[in-house]
Every structure is written in structure tokens, then in C-alpha cells.
Image: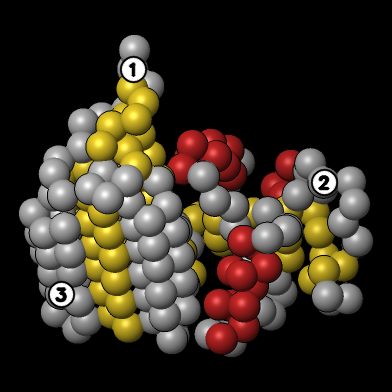
């Protein structure tokens, strides 16, 4: 498998794969950072260009997203699918995922300590970070990023490409639009329209990206 990225969050994805005994034949991809060693932790090679990635995909097409930021995750997903990759999810065995009615699409990262209860639908490319909680019958659209400690109550809807900051709380039955930024620590008590940034307790609109 190839982890896209080789710093920061990519190293956390490595830990999840280690927890799940999936590190055999693992490599990283980074064509940006000049300061990386040839081997991460002395054992996992770093690929530096798309030709190397294509050669690897001819033998093992699996890749996992190892970078945050919704727009960048989508860009890299498209880039590596286009050269023959097959995106895969990385789900920590120490996440707690309910046994009934949950759907997790391809290319998601679900990290240690996350809790998903029941009847939750998670679309492709979503990042659910450390110690997030997601309540019943919630829908999370594609390429959403939940930062550590995010709490989403039941019956919520989170639009595509939204970023939710650390320790933010979404109250029940709230609908969050697409391309929204929710600041760290915010408490969202009412629906949030597309392409806005909200912050505060209770959260209010601070920016309108569509203007």
C-alpha cells in the first residue's frame, strides 16, 4: 500500500496500519518535501514522482490518503485514481463503530478513539480524527475533515468539503452546508449555509466565501 503524504498526518495513518497489521510492503509518497530521508523510520521507502507510483500500482494499486484539508484530499484522490490507484480506507481497530446501519465509503481515515454509534453514513474521502464522536443517523458527505475531539450529535448533516475544527460541537438535527469552516471550539446551534466560516459559542457567521 502507498500512503499519500509522508509527514504529520501520514505518520498517524502509519500508526493505524500498524495497529491493524497492514504495514507489509508499505511506502509513502511525497513529491514536495526535500528534507525527507529515503526511508521513513528506517524501513518505509518514500516515492518521489508519479512514475514511481505508477510502477508500484502495477503490483499493488492500493493507496490511502495521508494528508488533511478537504480540497487537497480531493485533489490527491483524483490524481492517484487517474494513474490506476485504488483508494482504501484506514480504520483504527481502536475506533468504536456500532454494529447496525453504519456505512463507511472508500478512502476514509477513522482514527484511534473515534466513536460512531448507529445509522451513520460516511461518504468517500472523509477524515474522522482522534476521539471524535458521531451520533445516530448522521450523514457526512465526501471529503469532510473532522479535527480531533469533534462532537457531532444525532441526526446531523455535514456537507461535502467541510472542515470542522478541534473540539467543535454540533448540536442535534443541525445541517451544515458544503465548503464550510467551523472554528475550533465552536458550538453550532443552528444550520450553517454553504461557503461560510462560523466561530464562537454559539457559533455565528464570521466570513462568507461566496461573496
Instruction: Say which of 179 and 40 sits in front.
Output: 179
Check disc 3 and report its element: helix, strand or loop.
loop
Quick one: quadrant of the C terminus? top left
Q: Return the residue nearer the eye: 156 or 126.
A: 156
Picture coordinates of residue 23, whole percent (x, y): 66, 79
User: From the viewer's perspective, is 176 left or right of 75?
Assistant: left
Residue appearing at x 33%, y 22% in the figure: 208
Element class at badge 2 = loop
The CA span between labels 1 and 2 is: 32 Å
Residue drawn at the location 46% of the way across and 71% of the way down: 130
> Which label sits on residue 118?
3
- Looking at the picture, tell me which residue is in the foreground, 204 or 51: 204
Quote the CA–CA distance across marks 3 and 1.
34 Å
Chain-order first, disc 3 or disc 1: 3
Residue 8 placement: quadrant: bottom right
Q: Judge the density around disc 1: few (<14), some (14-19), many (≥20) Cα neighbours within 10 Å.
A: few
Vertical arrangement, residue 57 with respect to residue 81, above or below: below
Circle 2 Cα neighbour tier, 10 Å, few/some/many (<14 / 14–19 / ≥20) = few
Q: Is residue 173 visible?
A: yes
Q: Which residue is mark 1?
A: 210
Per the image, the residue denoted by label 2 is 33
Amino acid at each position: 500500500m502507498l500512503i499519500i503524504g509522508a509527514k504529520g498526518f501520514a505518520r498517524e495513518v502509519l500508526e493505524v496500519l500498524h495497529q491493524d497489521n497492514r504495514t507489509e510492503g508499505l511506502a509513502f509518497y511525497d513529491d514536495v518535501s526535500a528534507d525527507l530521508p529515503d526511508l521513513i523510520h528506517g524501513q518505509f521507502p518514500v516515492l518521489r514522482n508519479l512514475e514511481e507510483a505508477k510502477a508500484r500500482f502495477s503490483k499493488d494499486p492500493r493507496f490511502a490518503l495521508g494528508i488533511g484539508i478537504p480540497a487537497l484530499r480531493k485533489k490527491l484522490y483524483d490524481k492517484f485514481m487517474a494513474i490506476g490507484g485504488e483508494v482504501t480506507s484506514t480504520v483504527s481497530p481502536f475506533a468504536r463503530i456500532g454494529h447496525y446501519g453504519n456505512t463507511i465509503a472508500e478512502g476514509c481515515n477513522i482514527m484511534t478513539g473515534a466513536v460512531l454509534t448507529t445509522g451513520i453514513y460516511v461518504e468517500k474521502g472523509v477524515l474522522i480524527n482522534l476521539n471524535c464522536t458521531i451520533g445516530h443517523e448522521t450523514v457526512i458527505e465526501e471529503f469532510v475533515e473532522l479535527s480531533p475531539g469533534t462532537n457531532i450529535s444525532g441526526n446531523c448533516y455535514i456537507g461535502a468539503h467541510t472542515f470542522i475544527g478541534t473540539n467543535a460541537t454540533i448540536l442535534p438535527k443541525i445541517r451544515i452546508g458544503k465548503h464550510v469552516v467551523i472554528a475550533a471550539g465552536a458550538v453550532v446551534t443552528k444550520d450553517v449555509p454553504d461557503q461560510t466560516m462560523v466561530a464562537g459559542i454559539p457559533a455565528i457567521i464570521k466570513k462568507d466565501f461566496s461573496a
